Amino acid sequence: MIKIFRLKNIISVKDFEREDIEYILNEASKLENIAKSKETSEELKGKILGLMFFEPSTRTRMSFETSMKRLNGECIGFENSKSSSVSKGESIADTAKMIEGYSDALVIRHELEGVSKFISDIVEVPVINAGDGAGQHPTQTLLDLYTIKNEIGFIDDLKIALIGDLKFGRTVHSLAYALGLFNNVKIYLVSPPELEMPQEVLHDLDKTNVKYEKVDSIEKIIDDINVLYVTRIQKERFGDINDYLKIKGAYIINRKMLEGKDLIVMHPLPRIDEIDTDVDNTKYNKYFTQAENAVPVRMAILKTLIKNNPK
Ligand code: NCD
């Protein structure tokens, strides 16, 4: 039996218990009909979501907006710091407190780790972390798990390879923490040496049931995995562009590598060149389905947080 969702804010996957994840995935599947048939429901009628996006976003921002609108709520906010008064020198704290006055929940994306947590400490409404620098991206993880559950059928016993920028990629940090809550999961970590999974995350994984292994090539593990989770090299987080140029294109997945394999390919997107477009029209491609799944999952998140925490 899935209990009530305990959290007021969604800041870090480290705050989750397995039941919290299962609660949201279950709610999302109940909302999938509305999301996919492009209908609406009245669940959040009259409610307003405040979007504070200091860093670029397409899918995350648009899927939060779509999710709110499908539940008959509305959105306000800004999509880059230039169009907010932060560019005039206003503090993030003042901006957040002001938008809190207008809305029932806040969604925040910022280039600095810890900003959503900071804001959640100073406002009363629920706060959702939509990506904080190289930190975490917990709502992406929920939609990743939803996709895995729908496409593979299980999360316990999963064998997954995380590929690409494991150092700066916040989606893989969050996903690794979440998989630590399931049983008998095996994670293969495939990255250039410069972009390995942070020691802190590995240290935390050591305390879970997850087994992980660093490998230097995809070929070694491709026959043993259910999911190939590919990530973009996070160019914007490199201090020196030459370091990025040296690593760029380190791992590229193409159709030929996948032929005859029993796995799915996921990617939080945007894709640069990590997955050849010849994979797009194959059964392996689940990255666009994954992006579509953002809507039922974020509908579930918004409905749960806003209804559990009325203003
Ligand atoms: C990711 C992000 O912003 O962390 N994108 C997303 O939200 N789907 C991945 C990325 O930017 O590479």
Image (spheres, grey):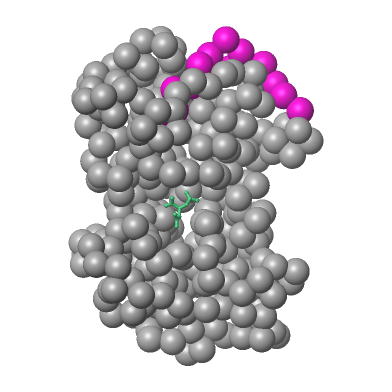
Query: Residue 252 at x, y = what percent?
Result: 52, 78
Q: Is residue 268 left or right of residue 53?
A: right
Vertical position of residue 279 compared to residue 135: above or below: below
Q: Is residue 134 above or below residue 161?
A: above
> Can I make out residue 27 in this image?
no
Q: Position of residue 32 (x, y in %)?
A: 69, 38
Which residue appears farthest toward the bottom when viewing the image? 220
- Residue 20 location in percent, x, y? 44, 39
Left or right relative to 279: residue 10: left
Q: Is 131 left, or right, of 150 in this rendering?
A: left
The percent coordinates of residue 270 (x first, y second) are 53, 57
Instruction: Give the dominant element type of the magenta stretch: helix, strand or loop.
Output: loop
- Asked if residue 68 lies in the magenta stretch, the reply is no
Front-most of residues 84 and 104: 84
Q: Is residue 50 magenta?
A: yes
Which residue is at a point 52% across and 65% down the rendered structure image? 272
Range covered by the magenta-colored residues = 39-52
- Residue at image position (29%, 16%) is 97
159 vs 218, nearest the viewer: 218
Q: Can residue 281 be seen in this snapshot? A: yes
Which residue corresponds to the image point at 41% horizontal and 40% vertical from the top-left? 130
The quadrant the C terminus occupies is: top left
